[in-house]
Image (tube, rainbow, N blue to C red):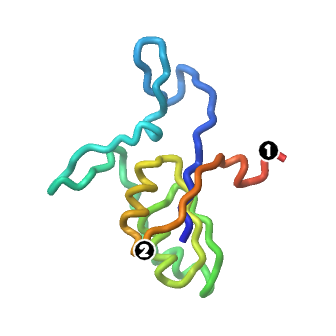
Amino acid sequence: MRLLHAVDTRATNPGDATTRTGAHRTGTPWSEGRLLAGPAGRPRILFGRMYEDPAVELAAFPPGSRVLCIASAGDTAAALAAAGHEVTALDLNPAQLAYARARLEGGAPARTGTAERLTGATR
């Protein structure tokens, strides 16, 4: 399984989810990590958890499929990889990717890039 970190390239504007100190942008909540110590010293991610049922995707793909999981470097991506699929998980949050990488046995290669590059939109 490969984990990809997509860099947020959106322009700063008052309507986006940027973190500000005075008039200076310090980053998005995703680039800031948004982690807090949780039970037993384990990090707790400070944004909502989406309910994922890996059984849906496991039933949808034939054995050995190549699967791109967007904004899902979590349970579904790990379940698909464990079932023998070639999985690439893409997420904007570096803290989420680090958490997912730590959960995967043997680790996973990781790269940083933009979503535009992944889709070829910059060509």
- Residue 29 appears at what percent x and percent y? 43, 36
Q: Residue at x 65, y 75 (%)?
A: 66
Asked whether, in this view, residue 10 is left or right of residue 78, the answer is right
Specify few, some or many for label 1: CA neighbours under 10 Å numbering under 14, 14-19, or 20 or more. Answer: few
Quadrant, the N terminus: bottom right
Specify few, some or many for label 2: CA neighbours under 10 Å numbering under 14, 14-19, or 20 or more. Answer: few
Q: Nearer the viewer, mark 2 or mark 1?
A: 2
Viewer-proximal residue, 121 or 110? 110
Q: Give the Cα distance between marks 2 and 1.
A: 33 Å
Q: As shown in the figure, which amino acid type bears the numbered disc 2? A: Gly
Asked whether, in this view, residue 72 is left or right of residue 99, the answer is right
| Tag of residue 96 | none
Q: Residue at x 37, y 63 (%)?
A: 102
Q: Indicate which disc, 2 or 1, sits on the residue closer to the N terminus.
A: 2
Where 11 sits versus 82, above or below? above
> In this figure, which residue is indicated by the disc labeled 1?
122
- Residue 104 appears at what percent x and percent y? 41, 70
Where 50 sits versus 75, above or below? above
Asked whether, in this view, residue 74 is left or right of residue 1, the answer is left
- Residue 115 appears at what percent x and percent y? 66, 48
Q: Residue at x 49, y 21 (%)?
A: 25
Q: Quadrant of residue 107?
A: bottom left
| Tag of residue 106 | 2
Viewer-proximal residue, 26 or 29? 26
Q: Quadrant of residue 32?
A: top left
- Residue 16 appears at what percent x and percent y? 53, 28
Which residue reaches farthest left?
Answer: 40
Q: Secondary structure at mark 1?
A: loop
Q: Secondary structure at mark 2?
A: loop
Q: As shown in the figure, which amino acid type bears the numbered disc 1? A: Thr
Where 69 sits versus 55, above or below? above
